[in-house]
Image: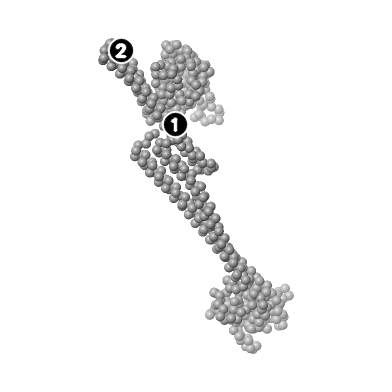
Amino acid sequence: MLLRPSEHKASSFITFEISKLSMKIQNKLFVFLFSFSLILVTVLVSLMQWSIDKGMIEYVISKEVATLKPVLSKLADEYKIDNSWRSMTGKNHKFGQLIHQELAGSDFEIKRNNHLPRKKGFKKPEHIPPHLAERRPPANIENGDNRPPLPPQRDAHYALLDSKETLIAGSYPLTLTYTKTPIELNNQVIGFVAISKRNELTQGYEVDFIEQQQNYLWLIALIVMLLVALLTLPLARHIVEPIKLITRGMHKLTRGDYQQSIDLKRKDELSELSRDFNELALTLAKNDSARKRWLANISHELRTPVAILRGELEAMLDKVRPLTLTNIASAHDEVKHLQRLIDDLNQLASADIGGMGYRKHAEELVSLIQNEAGKYRSYLADAGITLLLDFSVEEANIYADKTRLYQLFENIINNCIKYSGASELKVSLTVDNADEQRSQSNKGTVTLTIEDNGIGVDEAHLAHLFEYLYRVEDSRNRETGGFGLGLSICQHIVIAHQGKISAVASSLGGLALIITLPLV
């Protein structure tokens, strides 16, 4: 199919835009993959940092609880004195001394440096709700211990609670959360040591460890993103490159260069697309070759009768040949040849655009052929050909246009008379009945074989016999009266009846045409 200049420009513009789009796809794909990887790595690093911080804080708290284990037995001894917490009630200083002595020399030693920064969230509450006021005992004035709770600038808060978790001694701000370790005596819980939970670490080797791990994590994240960039760009190119190849191929197709083949050694959708492209290019090449051959054959077939007719008329005008009825009849024969060619071309054009009308009815094929056999025998007898009928069934019902079937048979018989050089033409009919599993609407097929004992056709030409104006050899030329369009028309008629037609070598030595039609 040729493209008009406007269509060619439009196709070139579309292909160019597609090429630009493929470049954009590569860039977008790279940016998308890189951005997704960046977000994913950032989230993972942040979660890992949070997990390390949380785990380290829990580890430090558990270590601090383990360090204060001896305090639990000392407090249990205090409880034994009066079998109550009377000796510790309100004794903030005494409780603080026990804690301080146990933590001395450890990583949790209490630093009494007022200039140390206070941690967020460790403020002493200015107001205690009434329903929690009973948890804060009054100062023990009798024992002279009216000191305030431990200073708020301490790194941690420690408190002694009874079995009902009421404050006995120590610092117990209600805005904090605590780890409570039970104090047991005779397998009974007599109280708890509450240690405020840390929200963050401010000193010690744990802080150095966390900072070191954070640095390592971000370094690993940077390395991972470099690897992602190195892998994403080739991946995007690997995905988009076949699209570019197909785009360039399509651009060449729009310019009429159909000798294109794209070989993608892949096993994905792009490989399937390349195979479809190759099939398209091959089909366009075949169609272009057929179109050129069609134009050449048409011009030849039209030029020949016109040239003969012109020569005869000019000869009569120049009085080279006498103006007789015989010479006029010869010129008239050429006009008839030309008219038949034009009519056949018109029929083929109508068939291609769906203009050949069909009025189908239920027909019985066996009787239809037998009724026309007498006429066909007379045609064939004039050419010295004997007609033989070999029907294996008595009836074969089909849904067809009887007039078109007559046209089909006449074209085949004329083709045999003009081209085959045969002395015998055999028509066979067989039926392939549908089995019981088939639906009632599909009764099977009827096969009609028309074969001769003529010169036959080489196997290389069999597949092309139904092409327009296809010539096999010199004996099948225009001088025998044929134009090479009859079998093309036959193919259109058979296809319109939902059938198939093919050419094979005949068992009689010539050519066999096999027509398959559906039964009803």
Q: Residue 396's x, y, as percent?
A: 49, 22
Give whichever of 289, 502 is nearer the camera.
289
The reply to whether residue 343 is visible in this rendering is: no
Looking at the image, residue 515 lies above or below residue 274: above
Q: What SS does tag 1 mark?
A: helix
Rendered image quadrant of residue 125 = bottom right
- Which class describes the residues within 10 Å of circle 1: few (<14), some (14-19), or many (20+)? few
Few, some or many residues within 10 Å of mark 2 (<14, 14–19, 20+) = some
Q: Position of residue 328 (x, y in %)?
A: 29, 13
Which residue has dot 1 on it?
A: 286
Residue beneath disc 2: 327
Query: Is residue 225 something one can see in this rendering?
Result: yes
Residue at coordinates 47% horizontally, 50% vertically from top-left?
26
Q: Is residue 369 above or below residue 250?
A: above
Q: In terms of secondary structure, where does tag 2 sit? A: helix
Where is residue 35 drawn, in percent x and y?
Answer: 49, 56
Closer to the camera, 392 or 67? 67
- In the image, what residue type sits under mark 1? Lys
Quadrant in which the N terminus is drawn? top left
Above or below, 221 against 409 in this view is: below
For residue 496, what is the image quadrant?
Answer: top left
Front one among 102 and 398: 102
Q: Amino acid at mark 2?
A: Asn
**Residue 84: x percent and y percent?**
69, 81
Residue appearing at x 55%, y 60% in the figure: 221
